[in-house]
Image (tube, rainbow, N blue to C red):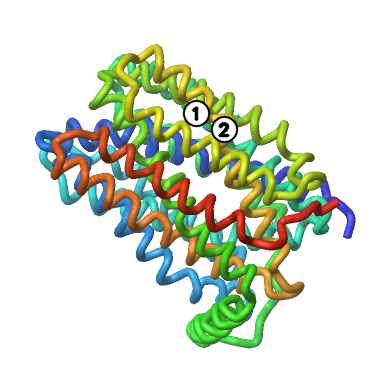
């Protein structure tokens, strides 16, 4: 298989597109707006409801991902459903403009729908990787996708900055919806088309569920993939919790203003972009296991240090260091997993990968919200995140595999 530049660029541009959602809606601006303006964060109530929204949406995606993987494999609807899920997210994002103070449940419902569309679409997006790149390039292409995504985060935040400064939050949500849709179009136009299957969507979904159970049994019997997925389940929970609560922590505990949060996240995304591209080739040459292990060690230190941070200046420095490992751990994990995927069963195996990844976003936000509410402080909550990284790291060290792709 040769690298098709049009396929690679189109695939990477979808990461560029959806990162506007990840940055503005999931991480920086909307969480703080929802927690403090829509709900109110007295006694951690906003933290609790935001954690519930993220956990509920991820639970739905996790439960549905085996069906989605089957539909992608057996019905020939991979690309069309990829488009539908993305469109669902875009419409929900645009609908955030209808929110007002006190509309707690409406905001909860819209963010659940937006997140289902975004995260559900990634099941299909990830399954394209083995179709567009040979194995020796999986690490690099995966890192290029994440790196391009961080560039999208930076650009969308720069566009959002003047809107947030002037209090035009509704315009901010519309900007994200347009950004997401426009830059997703190359993926829908140029990625490999659907191959017509022999099954209806419902039958394909049921088949996919059965094969997912079969795949899970296969993985459970295969010791190394099983240990990898258990490790990934735990440490990715830490990553997801940091992504959805870091802005809220900075705003609530350290007093960051909305425009300061954007500048902070710009620094994080810039360092993450640098980390993703710098570590792209080493992921293939050194092997993804070494790269993930190093990143998790850094994340454990970062989360532990955040417990003691008292000033904005120190948090700026810590966030810069954290960004270097953000893209690295996700890109290298995806490349690590491809080593366990049999040829021709990509969507099915990535359905399991998504099942584990989305399941990993259920417990962490709930734990953070619960600890924040019961303790009356976000510091014990952020410290609890360090445990996810450390436990995941210890399990990953026992996994055989993850050697060089090249």
Q: Which mark is residue 239?
A: none
- Are circles 2 and 1 on residues that touch, CB within 8 Å? yes
The number of numbered discs placed on residues in the rendered structure image is 2
Q: Which mark is residue 152?
A: 2
1 sits left or right of 112 in the view: right
* Quarter of image, res 264: top left
Q: Residue at x 68, y 60 (%)?
A: 128
How dense is the environment of label 2, judged by Cα within 10 Å: few (below 14), some, or many (20 and up)? many
Determine whether the residue tagged by mark 1 lies in a helix, strand or loop.
Answer: helix
Q: Residue at x 67, y 69 (%)?
A: 346
How dense is the environment of label 1, judged by Cα within 10 Å: few (below 14), some, or many (20 and up)? many
* Quarter of image, res 398: bottom right
Q: Is residue 365 above or below residue 155?
A: below
Q: Position of residue 314 (x, y in %)?
A: 40, 15
Q: CA distance from mark 2 to mark 1?
A: 6 Å
Residue topped by disc 1: 156
Q: Position of residue 362 (x, y in %)?
A: 35, 57
Q: Is residue 43 visible?
A: yes
């Amino acid at each position: 298989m040769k690298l098709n530049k049009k396929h690679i660029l189109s695939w990477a541009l979808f990461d560029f597109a959806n990162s506007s959602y990840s940055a503005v809606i999931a991480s920086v601006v909307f969480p703080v707006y929802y927690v403090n303006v829509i709900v109110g964060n007295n006694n951690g109530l906003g933290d609790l409801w935001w954690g519930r929204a993220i956990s509920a949406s991820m639970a739905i995606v996790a439960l549905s991902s085996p069906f989605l993987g089957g539909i992608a494999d057996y019905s020939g609807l991979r690309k069309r459903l990829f488009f539908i899920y993305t469109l669902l997210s875009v419409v929900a994002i645009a609908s955030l403009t209808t929110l007002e103070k006190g509309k707690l449940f409406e905001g909860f419902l819209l963010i659940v729908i937006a997140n289902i569309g975004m995260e559900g679409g990634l099941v299909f997006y990830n399954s394209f990787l083995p179709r567009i790149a040979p194995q020796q390039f999986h690490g690099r292409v995966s890192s290029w996708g994440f790196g391009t995504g961080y560039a999208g985060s930076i650009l969308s935040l720069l566009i959002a900055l003047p809107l947030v400064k002037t209090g035009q939050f509704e315009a901010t949500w519309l900007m994200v919806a347009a950004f997401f849709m426009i830059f997703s179009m190359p993926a829908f136009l140029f990625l490999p088309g659907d191959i017509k299957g022999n099954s209806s969507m419902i039958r394909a979904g049921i088949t996919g569920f059965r094969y997912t159970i079969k795949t899970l049994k296969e993985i459970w019997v295969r010791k190394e993939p099983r240990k990898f997925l258990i490790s990934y389940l735990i440490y990715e929970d830490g990553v997801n919790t940091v992504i959805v609560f870091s802005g809220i922590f900075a705003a609530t505990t350290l007093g960051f203003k909305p425009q300061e949060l954007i500048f902070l996240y710009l620094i994080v995304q810039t360092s993450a972009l640098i980390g993703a591209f710098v570590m792209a080739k080493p992921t293939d040459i050194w092997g993804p296991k070494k790269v993930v292990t190093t990143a998790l060690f850094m994340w454990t230190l970062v989360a532990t240090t955040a417990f003691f941070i008292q000033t904005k200046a120190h948090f700026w420095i810590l966030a810069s260091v954290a960004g270097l490992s953000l893209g690295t751990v996700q890109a290298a994990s995806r490349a690590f997993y491809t080593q366990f995927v049999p040829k021709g069963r990509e969507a099915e195996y990535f359905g399991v990968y998504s099942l584990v990844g989305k399941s990993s976003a259920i417990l962490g936000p709930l734990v953070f919200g619960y600890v924040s509410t019961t303790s009356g402080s976000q510091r014990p909550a952020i410290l609890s995140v360090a445990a996810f990284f450390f436990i995941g790291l210890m399990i990953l060290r026992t996994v055989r595999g993850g050697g060089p792709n090249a």
